[in-house]
Amino acid sequence: MKNYVASELILQQILSHGKEGAANGIMKMEDGKKYAFSDFYIFKGAKSTKIKSISSYVIEI
């Protein structure tokens, strides 16, 4: 999705616990398309800001 430009980002949920975090929502693009997304993060440690891995899922709605 790095070649697309979002005109609006709607975050519906953000969760974190220990070394893990997640966010989901909707991206509205400049061309009018909408995508639902969900991102899952694993951080290097419970209080770390460095990300160890990311899993992302995107579907057009």
Image (spheres, rainbow, N blue to C red):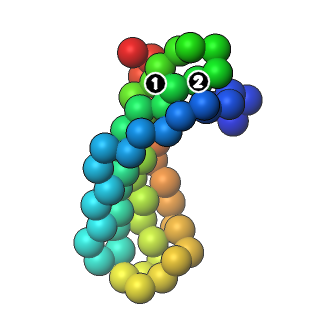
Disc 2 designates what residue? Answer: 29
Q: Is 28 drawn above or below residue 38 in the view shown?
A: above
Check residue 35 in the rendering and tell me which mark sits there, or answer none.
Answer: 1
Q: Is 29 drawn above or below residue 54 in the view shown?
A: above
Quadrant of res 7: top right
Q: Amino acid at mark 1?
A: Tyr
Alpha-carbon distance for marks 1 and 2? 8 Å
On screen, residue 28 versus residue 18, left or right, reads right
First in sequence: mark 1 or mark 2? 2
Q: Is 48 drawn above or below residue 22 in the view shown?
A: below
Q: Which residue is more in the foreground, 37 or 53?
A: 37
Q: Quadrant of the N terminus?
A: top right
Can see residue 47? yes
Label 1 Cα neighbours within 10 Å, binned few <14 / some 14-19 / many ≥20: some
On screen, residue 31 versus residue 12, left or right, reads right
Residue at left 49%, top 54%?
Answer: 54
Q: Amino acid at mark 2?
A: Met
Report x, y in % for residue 39. 42, 47
Q: Secondary structure at mark 1?
A: strand
Report x, y in % for residue 10. 42, 39
Q: Quadrant of the C terminus?
A: top left
Q: Which residue is more in the foreground, 50 or 11?
A: 11
Report the residue that reaches farthest toward the front.
8
